[in-house]
Amino acid sequence: MGKKFVSVLATVALVAVASCAFAAEAAPEVISTISWAAALGMAIAAAGCGIAQGLGLKAACEGTARNPEASGKITVTMLIGLAMIESLAIYALVVNLILLFANPFVG
Amino acid sequence: MAGGLHPIFLVEEAVKAIGLVDAHGHSLIPGNVLYSWTFMIILILVSTMATKKISLVPRGLQNFFEMVIGGLEDFVVANMGEDGRKVFPVLATLFIYILTCNLGGLFPGNDAPTANINTTASMAVFVFVYYQYWGFKIHGTHYIHHFTGPMIWMAPLMFPIEVIGHFARMLSLSLRLFGNIRGEDIVLALLFMLAPIVSTVPMYFLFMLADVIQAFVFFMLSMLYLKGAFEEAH
């Protein structure tokens, strides 16, 4: 068998084996509430993060348009600002990960 | 792990094969410790290779490292002034180590030590202690004036707020790095279950960029906190 065929076969086998198996020890209402909370929380955090990063990006583009020579510094500042804003959404993600996988009230 | 996956980490498997296993079959030394040692050994080996024959006109590996470290030092001195040279080795070590850890986690068979809250929290605690140490060393007891705000009668109000703010820096440093790298792991695992190669390969590029940015953000924030400790109070 060709090398390519074997590697494709291996990938398919891995995907077939790696099926979800979420261990659920909590009551269905609790799981439903946790799922709602995680999804909504992450969605709101992503929305706020998107708006804020969009504003930052808008200012960076305008600054570069006014003064193309400063585009290097502006880009670096923009990237740093984007990472800072992103971290707020990451805090929401960490709370969701705790809720989903390391919930102290469940299991 | 996300979706019930049980990833195979090569260094951990090697340690288990030697026999350092506990009752449940996990290796005695935690995975993140093992991988931080691995990346430390890699960095030490690469550094000794780069500095074996130092020449005035750099070639090869020495050239690459001179570029990285020279660029970092220029950045630190441009932002912090000449005081930056005193703390530059620590900052550059933070950046290069975190960058190696992050990028190494994307390698198949590896786990990023920074994907574990213990690694990132330990680095954040170290940065916190380090810049407080420099603050006390330079200013002595006048370092308290950094926490009291612009006017002395505001001190009882400003002091708790400033202390909480400083502790929040530790928290945010560790959580930012941990959340980013762990999030990348989970997204890659989930995308691999959905659409194995087509979706994961482009995400790799995005995550390599995000790794570099996160290492740089950690380094830059540590530099800014040190700068705040060095400079005079309000």
Image: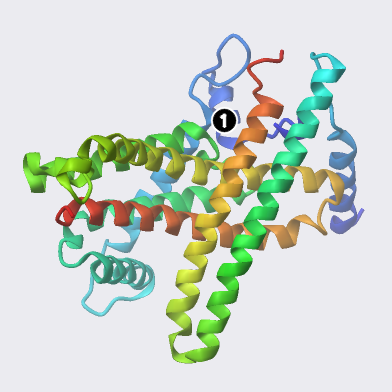
The spot of residue B27 in percent (x, y) is 55, 21
- Residue B179 visible somewhere in the drawing: yes
Going by the numbered disc 1, the residue's amino acid type is Glu
Number of callouts in the render?
1
Residue B186 placement: quadrant: top right
> Looking at the figure, which quarter contains the N terminus of chain B?
top right
The one of B33 and B222 positioned closer to us in this rendering: B222
Above or below, B86 against B6 in this view is below
The spot of residue A100 in percent (x, y) is 71, 28
Q: Would you say B98 lies left or right of B94 here? A: right
Parent chain of label 1: B
User: Which residue lies at the image location 50% right of the left edge and 34% below the top edge?
Assistant: B117
Other-residue count near label 1 (Cα within 10 Å), few / some / many at <14 / 14–19 / ≥20: many
The spot of residue B151 in percent (x, y) is 18, 49
User: Which residue lies at the image location 16% right of the left edge and 52% below the top edge?
Assistant: B233
The spot of residue B213 in percent (x, y) is 50, 60
User: Which residue lies at the image location 30% right of the left edge and 34% below the top edge?
Assistant: B160
- Residue carrying label 1: B12
Above or below, B84 against A18 in this view is below
User: Which residue lies at the image location 43% right of the left edge and 59% below the top edge?
Assistant: B216
As drawn, the residue found furthest toward the front would be B153
